[in-house]
Amino acid sequence: MKKQTIVAVSMVALLLSAASPFTNMETPVYAAVQGEAVKAEMKTLAQLDKNVVEAAKHAMQKHAGSVPIELDKISGENADCWVISAKDNRGEVLVTKKEGKVVFVKVTLKFNEVEANLQNTVTSTLKGMDAKRTYVIDSVERINREKGNVWQFNGENISVSIDVETGKVNTASLGYTNQQMNAKVVETAQKTLKSLSNGNTSGLLPDVTLVKDTQRHWDQVWSFMDSSRTYSIIIGAKTGKVVSATIFNEFRNDNYVSDEDIPKVFAKPFYTKEKAIVALNPMMKKVFNLDLSGYNVSSKYNEYTFTKKGKPTVTASINKKGVFYDFTVTPENGLVN
C-alpha cells in the first residue's frame, strides 16, 4: 500500500468528501480578469459539438436517476476537456473535447431523492457508530471518476461514502470536540503526542473524528491531530489503544517522494530484516507498547511489514533517509477497533 500521499484522518471529511477535479481549471470568473481575448474563447453549449453535449447530458441523467437534469453552461475548460454544469447546482461533468468521452460525473441530490435502501444504509451506519446523536444529511453527491464510483452523503460533522457497485460503506466519519470525548481517550492521545514529538508539541486540535474505514479494516477509531498538523494519532474506539500514528514532517519537503518515483527510489531494500527491527523497535515500544523482537519482516519499496504468530501485525513506512514516519498496528483478527 502506498503511504506517500497519506492524509490525516482527522481531516477525513476531505478524503471522504469528493473534491472536484476542476479546482485548477480556468472558469468564467477567472477568465474575466484575464482580459477580453481569453473571455472571447469561452464557448457556449450551443457552440459545442452535439455529440459532446449529448454525452454530457446522458451521463448526468444516468447518474441522477429519475431526477431531471438540465445542462446550463460551460463553467471551465483545459486543453483536453470541457467542464459542463447543470442548472440549479445539480452537478457537473467533464467531457473530452475531441471524443466527447465522459471522464468525471458529479450529480447533487437531496437525501429524500435517493433510494430507500441507501438512506437506510447511511442511517444504520451512523446509528451504529453513535446511537445517541441525531443525524441530518444536507447533501448527497453521486460521483463517478477514475478513482471510484461512489455515493457521498454529507451533513454537519457527518460524512458517509458508499460504493455504488457493492452498496457497502467505504468510509464514515463523525466529528466531535475534545470536551465531548472520554477523558481517558484524550489523555492517551496527549501522552502519545508527547512521545511522538519528544515533548515538543503545541497540543491537540480541539476537533476529533470517529472514523469507520473498511479498506483500512478500521471498525471504529478516534482520529486526533496536533494543532501544528504535524502528528496524527489513531486510537481504537473500543479498545482505547493507539493503533496508528503518522509523523508528517518526515515525508515533507526534501523527504517527499511521489508515488510514481517510489519504485525507483526504493528499488533496493533500505533495511535488512535485523536492521529494520532495530530502527523501528524503539518507537514501537515507546508509543505502542509492543516489542518487535522475534518478528519476521518483509518489505515492498518503502513499506515494511512485521509479523509474528499470535501477535499484532505492524506496517510501517520510511522516507528516503530510512526514517519511519507512518505506523499501523493491526490485531491478529484483522479488525482495528
Image: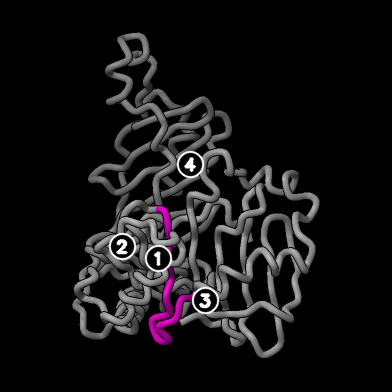
**Sequence-wise first label, 1 or 2:** 1
**Sequence-wise first label, 3 or 1:** 1
- Provide the residue designation for mark 1: 193
Residue in front for this viewpoint, 118 or 255: 255
Secondary element at image label 4: helix
Q: Amino acid at mark 4?
A: Ala
Task: Classify 10 Å Cα crowding around label 2: few (below 14), some (14-19), many (20 and above).
Answer: many
Which is closer to the viewer, label 4 or label 2?
2
Magenta segment range? 230-242
> Do tag 1 and tag 2 residues touch (Cβ < 8 Å)?
yes
Quarter residue 240 falls in: bottom left
Q: Amino acid at mark 3?
A: Phe
Task: Classify 10 Å Cα crowding around label 1: few (below 14), some (14-19), many (20 and above).
Answer: many
Q: Amino acid at mark 1?
A: Leu
* Quadrant in the picture for the C terminus: bottom left
> Do tag 3 and tag 1 residues touch (Cβ < 8 Å)?
no
Compared across the picture, whether 322 is left or right of 148 comes to right
Task: Please check the rendered image and state whether residue 235 is part of the magenta-colored stretch, yes or no.
Answer: yes
Image location (x, y in percent) of residue 205: 28, 60
* Mark 2–mark 3 distance (CA, rounded to whole Å): 19 Å
Compared across the picture, whether 77 is left or right of 261 comes to left
* Mark 4–mark 3 distance (CA, rounded to whole Å): 53 Å
- Provide the residue designation for mark 2: 204
- Provide the residue designation for mark 4: 55
- Can the viewer see residue 141 in this picture? no
Q: Residue at x 41, y 33 (%)?
A: 24
**Sequence-wise first label, 4 or 1:** 4
- Provide the residue designation for mark 3: 288
**Sequence-wise first label, 4 or 3:** 4
* Quadrant in the picture for the N terminus: bottom right
- Can the viewer see residue 3 in this picture? yes
